[in-house]
Image: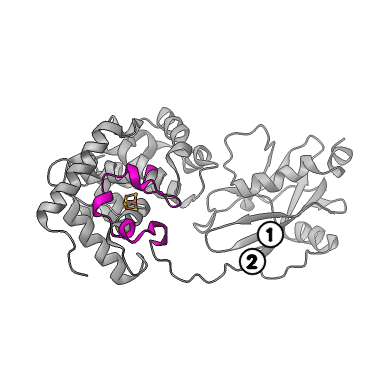
Amino acid sequence: MENPFGEATCRQLAGLLLTRYDREGRDLPWRRTRDPYRIWLAEIMLQQTGVKTVLPYYAGFLERFPTIQALAEGELEEVLSLWQGLGYYRRARHLHATARHVVRELGGRFPDTCEAMGRLPGIGPSTAGAILAIAFGQHQAILDGNVKRVLARVLALAMPPDTTVGKRTLWEQARRLTPRERPGDYAQAIMDLGATVCTLRQPLCPSCPWQGYCAAQREGCPEAYPVRLAQAPKPRKYQFQALVTRPDGRVLLLPKRDATLLGGLWHPPGDEPGLSAVPPEAEAVRRHLAEGLGIQVATPCPLDAVAHTFTHFHLTVFPFLCPWRAGEPPEASGGRWIDWRQDRRTPLATLHRKVLARLSESPATPALEA
Ligand code: SF4
């Protein structure tokens, strides 16, 4: 694609955006600082998550971990427990790993080049660009989801932004449009534009400072951009989970030790997600607990299934209420009896909170808990 805008027009576009930002930019806590730690934290939290959701998590996280040193000294389990409900838990694991690396290997200072920054866990080129532009005032472009959408519309980009050519074109235009003066404010301004004006649905073109330059708007169909890749339907997977309850209401939970999906979080025992849509027999659940964990339970009672969607698949969980009779989980399993309603320290994913909530929804539970 040829460059649609000359240098003078790029300067004009940046100026229009900065004027809007000075007038209407949102006052957000991470915009009141140049501290790379605080800016990095916000950028990681804002990946795949909206500002409104992030605000309380950001405040809570900084209260507990006000500096990168404090975060590096903290335990991953505590980081994950503060992250509960924010989703995409890999971000939290990367955050913790990066903090330890920066403190232990780099003397507590973030690197100040794109290459070095991009080598840190969880920091891609756009996040690196944002931190360097905002915290260090460097002339660096960003290309997060919001910016991709804005630029794909302004250019009426004919291909999906995540194809090789689409990505290359958008990065090139993002770099050309980023001004040498105030690159950090420009980064914030274009993210603001994508989040509040050039929204996924019903963009507010009459309020947009780039209206007169936008090819999609000229075509009269901004929502047709970005062009989407044909998506294969997500597969559906199934698993069972055993809610082993003690008479005092505590439930057996196990830590997920690998770094895959929901790694570092806690979950009820069960099998791995698979393709069989048929829930197991109660006897198979009882045997699974006895043979795998040495736990004896009364006859498992099926509860209502729980549906959840991850990025790459839909999952249906078949929960079973399993009143404990005897046995303790082996030490190697790391299993703990947890009062999950009161406990705030054990990190649980939203999926497992939904599964555990079946205990209070089920008419079978009170009789068995009594
Ligand atoms: S004119 Fe409309 S479609 Fe174009 S960038 Fe602005 S809000 Fe987005």
Q: How many marks?
A: 2
How would you rate the neighbour count of disc 1 (Cα within 10 Å): few for under 14, some for 14-19, many for 20 or more?
many
Q: Identify which residue is drawn at 63% across, 49% down.
A: 351
Q: Which residues are magenta?
A: 196-225
Residue 277 highlighted magenta (yes or no): no
Q: Is the residue 103 above or below the residue 232 in the image?
A: above
Q: Quadrant of residue 348?
A: top right
The amino acid marked with disc number 2 is Arg
Q: Nearer the viewer, residue 146 or 40?
A: 146
The percent position of residue 244, horizontal first and vertical second, equals: 76, 47
- The residue wearing badge 1 is 316
Q: Give the SS element for disc 2.
A: strand
Q: Nearer the viewer, residue 343 or 349?
A: 349
Residue 34 can be seen in this image: no
Q: Identify which residue is drawn at 29% across, 41% down.
A: 103
How would you rate the neighbour count of disc 2 (Cα within 10 Å): few for under 14, some for 14-19, many for 20 or more?
some
Q: Nearer the viewer, residue 361 or 11?
A: 11
- The residue wearing badge 2 is 236
Q: Identify which residue is drawn at 35% across, 48% down.
A: 205
Q: Are marks 1 and 2 in contact (CB under 8 Å)?
A: yes
Residue 16 can be seen in this image: yes
